Image (cartoon, rainbow, N blue to C red):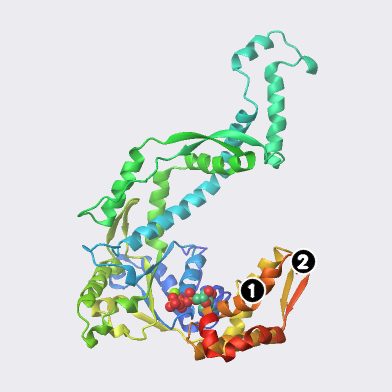
């Protein structure tokens, strides 16, 4: 019964380890939550209702990996994922985004994923159709009437071949050329579907976001789709037509149905900045805004607990969606959230502040490490970038120092430091630093480029 693709908590953590340094506790808990969702879905019915979903509250300073962990988790699970900021929501009934929009986004995401997968399945079939369309534009086929006419004469020798056969041969030759990409630069005229523009104004007054989207969608579907002639290269035509033709080959109702299921059973919603909607400031006597913040929290309750949400692709039940909330909680505390909402996020994980040693590892180890990103950027111009180990320690030390002195922005500091360090080199490629050159980043270079900035608090505040 156990799904082959389903990873065990240990395997999930091992996968997360490839991208995120440290934060063992958070990794472990998200891994358990992911597996528990599956376990809960397979519990015998009565008990199932008793088990509350394992929604998680991540607590940690900025730039320590909260979003990154959730995003990677979704990738690992091949799950629809959406990230929202709690502070952007407004209470139902007020102008702005209502909380249900996060579920609509999630379904939209799932539709994209399923659609992409289905398109991939019909790709080969669609490619054939596309070749035919391009061929027709290049060498229009001979009218079938002629074939019966000439075939009566039964000409067999090649130089007296019928028009139809000749035509067929030429088409075959060109089919090869289209396939090999040999004539990708040649221009042809194709007609492409152009959906009627949605350039209509907002429909105002007394309508919530959901019904507004539905209405716009309905109107758009009623508008006739216009075909438009366009001159494009064959290379471009292949892409445009492949997209169009594979879309024709898939059944959108099936896509929607599958997408809803996927979102219901595997979706992950990441709610960032929940501390911003906690009513912590009420102690300072803040009046108005708190009421609305609490309203947003109340609106969140049914969604997180499990309810049905109407989307343009269908109704989705939110019972098994995994919600991960996150916040720094510097000012407000988790206990400042309304008790009901606290109860919906039973798992608390605190993320550690990153150390200098973590920074060194973050620079070096993750599959997508910054150092590797810059290497790849420069390699695209055939410049080989390398770093001495000492230089990485120095970058880590400086980043950590600036975080302490100026403001702690976590691992994001590495981005600013690295960009400062390598900017001149990026500017000098390819004129001053030509292809096949080698650039070695040394500790001395790091010091030379950054020391002045790091020494002066004012400077680093502005520049790093
Ligand atoms: N522990 C870590 N290991 C590897 N990279 C990290 C780690 N923490 C942060 N990063 C990197 O730092 C950047 C910011 O991280 P992330 O977006 O996860 O921060 P956050 O904790 O969500 O912060 P915020 O509270 O501001 O949203 C990302 O590019 C991420 O790759
Ligand atoms: Mg974040």
Q: Taking 429 as reference, is 251 left or right?
A: left
Pick whichever, 402 or 168, lies toward us.
402
Pick whichever, 319 or 402, lies toward us.
402
Q: Secondary structure at mark 1?
A: helix
Coordinates of residue 42 in the picture (x, y in percent):
38, 66
**Residue at x 63%, y 39% (from the top left corner):** 234
Of callouts 2 and 1, which one flags the residue occurring earlier in the amino acid sequence? 1
- The reply to whether the residue tagged 1 has its Cβ within 8 angstroms of ligand 1 is no
Number of residues whose C-alpha sits closer than 10 Å to that of mark 1, classed few (under 14), some (14–19) or many (20 or more) = few
- Does residue 93 lie above or below 151 as drawn? below
**Residue at x 24%, y 79% (from the top left corner):** 338
Quarter of the displayed picture in which ligand 2 can be seen = bottom left
Coordinates of residue 142 in the picture (x, y in percent):
63, 19
Residue 423 bears which disc, if any?
1
Q: Taking 292 as reference, is 328 left or right?
A: right
**Residue at x 71%, y 69% (from the top left corner):** 428
Coordinates of residue 110 in the picture (x, y in percent):
43, 56
Q: Secondary structure at mark 2?
A: loop
Q: Quadrant of residue 344?
A: bottom left
Please give the residue where the numbered disc 2 appears in the rendered image.
434
């Amino acid at each position: 019964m156990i799904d082959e693709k389903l990873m065990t908590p240990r395997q999930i953590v091992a996968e997360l380890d490839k991208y995120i340094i440290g934060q063992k506790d958070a990794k472990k808990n998200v891994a358990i939550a992911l597996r528990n969702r599956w376990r809960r879905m397979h519990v015998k019915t009565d008990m199932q209702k008793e088990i509350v979903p394992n929604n998680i509250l991540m607590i940690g300073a900025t730039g320590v990996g909260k979003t990154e962990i959730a995003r990677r988790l979704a990738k690992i699970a091949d799950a629809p994922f959406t990230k929202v900021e709690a502070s952007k929501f407004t209470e139902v009934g007020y102008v702005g985004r209502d909380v249900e929009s996060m579920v609509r986004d999630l379904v939209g995401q799932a539709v994209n994923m399923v659609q992409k997968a289905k398109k991939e399945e019909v790709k080969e079939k669609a490619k054939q159709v596309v070749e035919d369309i391009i061929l027709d534009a290049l060498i229009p086929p001979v009218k079938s009437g002629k074939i019966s006419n000439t075939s009566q004469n039964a000409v067999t020798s090649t130089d007296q071949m019928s028009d139809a056969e000749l035509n067929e041969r030429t088409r075959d030759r060109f089919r090869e050329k289209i396939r090999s990409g040999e004539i990708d630069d040649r221009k042809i005229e194709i007609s492409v579907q152009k959906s009627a523009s949605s350039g209509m104004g907002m429909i105002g007054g007394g309508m919530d976001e959901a019904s507004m989207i539905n209405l716009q969608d309905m109107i758009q579907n009623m508008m006739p789709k216009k075909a438009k002639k366009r001159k494009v290269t064959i290379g471009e035509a292949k892409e445009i037509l492949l997209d169009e033709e594979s879309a024709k080959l898939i059944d959108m109702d099936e896509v929607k149905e599958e997408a809803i299921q996927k979102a219901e059973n595997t979706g992950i919603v990441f709610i960032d900045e929940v501390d911003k909607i906690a009513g912590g400031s009420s102690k300072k006597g803040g009046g108005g805004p708190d009421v609305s913040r609490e309203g947003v929290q109340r609106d969140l309750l049914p969604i997180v607990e499990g309810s049905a949400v109407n989307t343009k692709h269908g109704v989705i039940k939110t019972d098994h969606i995994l919600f991960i909330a996150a916040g720094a909680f510097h000012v407000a505390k988790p206990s400042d959230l309304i008790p009901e909402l606290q109860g919906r996020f039973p798992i608390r994980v605190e993320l550690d502040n990153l150390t200098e040693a973590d920074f060194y590892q973050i620079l070096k180890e993750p599959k997508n490490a910054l150092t590797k990103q810059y290497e790849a950027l420069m390699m695209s111009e055939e410049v080989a970038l390398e770093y001495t180990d000492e230089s990485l320690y120095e970058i880590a030390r400086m980043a950590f120092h600036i975080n302490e002195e100026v403001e702690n922005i976590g691992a994001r500091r590495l981005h600013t430091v690295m960009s400062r360090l390598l900017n001149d080199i990026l500017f000098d490629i390819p004129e001053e630093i030509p292809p096949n050159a080698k650039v070695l980043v040394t500790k001395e270079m790091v010091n030379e480029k950054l020391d002045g900035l790091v020494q002066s608090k004012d400077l680093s505040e502005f520049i790093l």
